[in-house]
Amino acid sequence: CSLLRFIQDNKPENRNLQVAAEQEVTAVELSHAITNHEITLAFQPKLTVQGLLLRGVEALARWKHPTKGIISPGIFIPLAERHGLIDALTRYLLQKAFEHKRRWQQYGLRFHLAFNLSPLSLADADMVDWLLKMTQDFGVAPADVTFEITENALLGELASAIRTLARLRLKGFHIAIDDYGTGFANAQQLSRVPATELKIDRSLVHRVASRPQQYTILASTVTLAKNLNLTTVAEGVETEEDFLVLQELGVDLVQGYYFSKPLFADDLLAWVKTGIS
Ligand code: C2E
Ligand code: CA
Ligand code: CA
Ligand code: CA
């Protein structure tokens, strides 16, 4: 029955309907959504390749629209960026993320929290000080928090973005270069970013087991990351075959539907309790 529903929901015509509805959201609605707490976070586990232990979770924004269903961040984050709402949205979501992190710590769970930062947030002058205050208020160690910044964001406003990242790093936060492999950063540019982690984009990971050329690119990416002393994370792992390749290449962490979809906080706790099967 649930499989039938899945097929039903994913019929092309139904998918299109969903997307059409999502695209109709406006900046005014988004602004109200922030005030009315309609935007929430889902969390996707990041696991160690060795032993499949829960290392951390990535916070992913979800808009629970009262009539249009769940709206993807791929729609409303760019909308927020275009309409000057991103700083307010980011701070609102960061506060939610810290609240969850504090609760997990109260339960004795100490896994890391990863949070996606818009490149525009790196230009928010007060962000670093505000973040430090948040870590104090919520009793969260900066070393337990990773900020994910896309490779492309680092290619644009390189100098000022790197200055902000360096300040964050100096305070103990971790920095991940996200979606690596979708942009054209060269090794030298990469080495100038004060990053601790490289997240290999799912376009390089997806079906790597059956694509020799992609395997070559993935293998050299892992080598580059290791030479730069970066923790390697493969995202979008959907099959066991792909996982086995990543294991063979010595990737450190994995994330993807094969292990878990992004989960709302209650489901995440249930998932943690039952352990990884
Ligand atoms: P991202 O940072 O690259 O996040 C990974 C995306 O891949 C997520 O999509 C996640 O649900 C999806 N994903 C995870 N595992 C798999 C898999 O095995 N297969 C496939 N096909 N997809 C997988 P999502 O949640 O729709 O987020 C899209 C993008 O929106 C994120 O890409 C991130 O760039 C941005 N985003 C999400 N939340 C926030 C936020 O709070 N702030 C900012 N600035 N950006 C956010
Ligand atoms: Ca990310
Ligand atoms: Ca990514
Ligand atoms: Ca992405």
Image: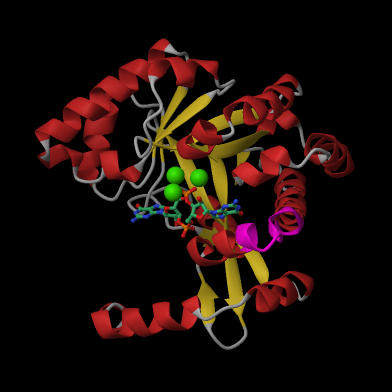
Quadrant in the rendering for residue 36: bottom right
Q: Is residue 83 magenta?
A: yes
Residue 203, position in %: x, y? 29, 44
Give the side of residue 12 with respect to residue 234, left or right: left
Residue 159, position in %: x, y? 62, 25
Residue 29, above or below 42: below
Q: Is residue 155 magenta?
A: no
User: Which one is in front, 36 or 163?
Assistant: 163
Residue 182, position in %: x, y? 35, 40
Kindly identify the residue that appears in the image at 38 percent across and 49 percent down: 256
Give the side of residue 240 with respect to residue 33, left or right: left
Kindly identify the residue that appears in the image at 41 percent across and 81 percent down: 20
- In this view of the protein, can residue 186 be seen by the observer? yes
Q: Characterize the magenta stretch by its predominant secondary structure.
A: helix
User: Which one is in front, 29 or 134?
Assistant: 29
- In this view of the protein, can residue 264 be seen by the observer? no
Q: In the rendered structure, which segment of residues is drawn in magenta?
A: 80-89
Kindly identify the residue that appears in the image at 71 percent across and 47 percent down: 101
Residue 201, above or below 64: above
On-image quarter of the N terminus: bottom left
